[in-house]
Image (cartoon, helix red, strand yellow):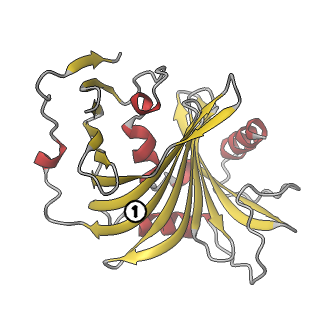
Amino acid sequence: MFGNRIKAAIVLLTLGSTSACLVRREAIRSGLRHPGTLLTANKEQLIARIHDASDPIESFLMNASLSASVLNPSKGVVTEYPAIDGYILFHRPAEIRIVGKLPMWPETILDMVCHENRFQLHLPRKNLLLVGDGNAPTDSNNALENLRPDAFLNSLTIAPPDPGLTILENDTNQTGAVYILLILDRAGNELRLVRTVYFDRYSLRIVEQRAFDSSGSLAGDAKYSNWRNYQGISYPSAIDIQRVRENYEVKLLVLSMKMNPPNVTPDKFVLTQPPGATVRRLN
């Protein structure tokens, strides 16, 4: 399915089309089944909605409940972990810090910082400090050691696309209705699909964002629901992050959110090496 979508997008862009409406006869992934009046929008209007959701956010401080599950492909077993309290700081363009603590207990179980595409991940129980870049390999048997900032940056934010490299698909049938923006990137003379953003046609809310790797394979899938107003800025209060290659899923429920607070300063994204920590550098 993804291969056909990529081919269609490339053909349309090659022909100089600025937008396209493609109808497929299959159920949509979002499972939108409620009746109502379908809303219409063109590509430019949908891109404007992404700008409306993204542009006002310079930084945020989020308190959330994080529930993780990990799939063991060889055994076909999914392990679910108890929810933890997550404290997430973000500053544009790509600074993020995530601190995970046990509920009702002061113990920190993870502390991850990303600054200028370099990240540090401290696991206090093992006093292990992982250091690497955003593309560092994820081959550990320990799910926490496979956490990477890009998985969260690409899910907690929705970057507005280049209109000239974006195609509109209308996926509407008897079981649901979404608009899909297919976002491409140009490498030399080639085009490839890098992201897709899904809009519910009953509300024009963003309901899903997928990211693809350089081979065109699905890398991450984020689903958004329960959009709320935080200090005048609309943001989803429930985000389901699925990482395909790493075989894990994180469900995030926003408990409180401060948009553009003055205390999200550069010093908050500094993680000092803990005394006695074992440092493992990832290439």
Looking at this view, is 80 or 150 the one in front? 80
Looking at this view, is 125 or 266 the one in front? 125
Residue sitting at x 77%, y 57%: 28
Is 55 above or below relative to 231?
Answer: above
Residue sitting at x 75%, y 83%: 36
How many marks the image carries: the answer is 1
Q: In this view, does 159 lie to the left or right of 46?
A: left
Q: Is residue 41 left or right of residue 135?
A: right
Where is residue 251? Give x, y as percent: 51, 53
Looking at this view, is 232 or 97 the one in front? 97
Q: Is mark 1 on a helix, strand or loop?
A: helix
- Classify 10 Å Cα crowding around label 1: few (below 14), some (14-19), many (20 and above): some
Q: Give the quarter of the figure containing the N terminus.
A: top right
For badge 1, the amino acid type reads Ser
Residue matched to label 1? 54
Is 101 above or below relative to 58?
Answer: above
In the current view of this chain or complex, which residue is farthest to the front?
105
Looking at this view, is 47 or 264 the one in front? 264
Q: In this view, does 259 lie to the left or right of 43?
A: left
Is 202 above or below relative to 126?
Answer: below
Q: In which quarter of the image is residue 126?
A: top left
Residue sitting at x 74%, y 43%: 5
Where is residue 20? Give x, y as percent: 72, 57
Q: Give the quarter of the figure containing the C terminus.
A: top left
**Is residue 159 in sight in this rendering?**
no
Where is residue 139? Give x, y as percent: 48, 20
**Is residue 151 in sight in this rendering?**
yes
Where is residue 52? Give x, y as percent: 43, 70
